[in-house]
Image: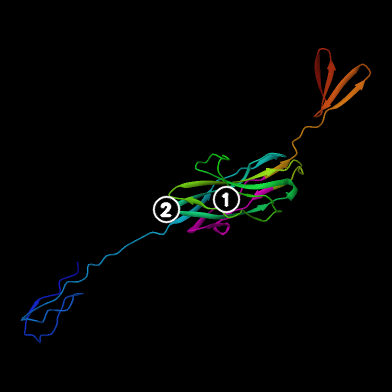
C-alpha cells in the first residue's frame, strides 16, 4: 500500500486540502483533515519466448546411387520461456551435383541426437541446382526442450560419380517461427556421389578353360571349385 496521506489538520470546514504522497483528497467536512491512502503499486515482469538455433553436425561421406534418407544437413532448436512454433525451413546447397542426381529433399525431426525417419515434416520433390531450397510450410511446436532437425536426400538410380553436395551455414534468415529466432548451425560435410554398382560379369572361354571377369578379378571355372586370380 502507498504511504498514508499525512497528518491530521485541526481546521474548519474551509481548511486547505493536504494529503500525503500519492494520497487522495483530504476530508474537509469537519474539524479534522486526514489525507487518503496511496495506491498499492505493483510491477509485473515477463520474459519473451524465443527459439535458439544450434548445431546438429553432418559429417562428410561417400553416397551411392539409389541410397535413401541420407542426411546432408542438420540443426537443433531449443525453446526458451516456452518456445514457439517453427513454421518454415529453407537451406542453402552448394556443390557440383545436378538435378538428375537427387530425387528429393526431406525434413525430419527427432527428440534425441539419433537420426530416425519416424517423423517426416516436409518434402521437396523437385530439388533445384545449388542454391536456396525451400520446404513447404510446416508447424512444429518447440517448448522448453531441444528438438533435432535433419535434412536428407534420396539419390537417383543414375548419378555422375564424383559429384558433390554440401549445405551451408543455417541461421535465422532460413527459418520462420512464431517467436524470435537466434543462433546458427554450422555447414555440413561434403557428400560425394558414386554409382557404387559392381561391373557386370564377363564370361570368357579359352580352349579348355572358362573364367569370369568380375570387378577386375578373374574367376577360373574349375571342377569342383573356383580359383581366383587378380587382373
Residue sitting farthest toward the right: 207
Sequence-wise, the earlier of marks 1 and 2 is: 2
Give left or right: position of 181 versus 126: left
Q: Quadrant of the C terminus?
A: top right
Q: Secondary structure at mark 2?
A: loop
Residue at which label 2 appears: 82
Residue 118 can be seen, yes or no:
yes
Disc number placed over residue 123 in the picture, else none: none
Give the extent of the magenta segment: 165-190
Q: Secondary structure at mark 1?
A: loop
Please state which of residues 153 and 162 is positioned toward the viewer in this rendering.
153
Residue 227 part of the magenta-drawn span: no
Which residue does the image show at 29% across and 64% down from the upper left?
43
Across the whole image, how many numbered discs are drawn on residues? Answer: 2
- Mark 1 vs 2: CB contact within 8 A: no
Q: Quadrant of the N terminus?
A: bottom left
Q: Position of residue 157 (x, y in %)?
A: 74, 40
Residue at which label 1 appears: 186
Q: Position of residue 119 (x, y in %)?
A: 55, 43
Crowdedness of circle 2 by 10 Å Cα count: few (<14), some, many (20+)? some
Q: Position of residue 42 (x, y in %)?
A: 27, 65
Crowdedness of circle 1 by 10 Å Cα count: few (<14), some, many (20+)? some
Give left or right: position of 115 versus 26: right
Amino acid at each position: 500500500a502507498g504511504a498514508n496521506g499525512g497528518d491530521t489538520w485541526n481546521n474548519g470546514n474551509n481548511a486547505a486540502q493536504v494529503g500525503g504522497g500519492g494520497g487522495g483528497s483530504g476530508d474537509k467536512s469537519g474539524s479534522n483533515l486526514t489525507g487518503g491512502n496511496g495506491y498499492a503499486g505493483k510491477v509485473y515482469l515477463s520474459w519473451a519466448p524465443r527459439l535458439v538455433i544450434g548445431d546438429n553436425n553432418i559429417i562428410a561421406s561417400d553416397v551411392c546411387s539409389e541410397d535413401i534418407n541420407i542426411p546432408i544437413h542438420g540443426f537443433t532448436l531449443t525453446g526458451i520461456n516456452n518456445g514457439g512454433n517453427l513454421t518454415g525451413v529453407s537451406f542453402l546447397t552448394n556443390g557440383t551435383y545436378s538435378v538428375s542426381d537427387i530425387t528429393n529433399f526431406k525434413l525430419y525431426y527427432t527428440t534425441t541426437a539419433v537420426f530416425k525417419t519416424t517423423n517426416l515434416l516436409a518434402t521437396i520433390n523437385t530439388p533445384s541446382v545449388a542454391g536456396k531450397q525451400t520446404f513447404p510450410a510446416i508447424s512444429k511446436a518447440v517448448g522448453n526442450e531441444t528438438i533435432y532437425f535433419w535434412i536428407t536426400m534420396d539419390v537417383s538410380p543414375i548419378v555422375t560419380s564424383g559429384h558433390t553436395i554440401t549445405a551451408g551455414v543455417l541461421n535465422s534468415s532460413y527459418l520462420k517461427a512464431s517467436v524470435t529466432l537466434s543462433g546458427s548451425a554450422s555447414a555440413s560435410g561434403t557428400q560425394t556421389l558414386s554409382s557404387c554398382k559392381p561391373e557386370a560379369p564377363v564370361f570368357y572361354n579359352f580352349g579348355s578353360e572358362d573364367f569370369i571377369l568380375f570387378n577386375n578379378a578373374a574367376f577360373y571355372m574349375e571342377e569342383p571349385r573356383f580359383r581366383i586370380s587378380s587382373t
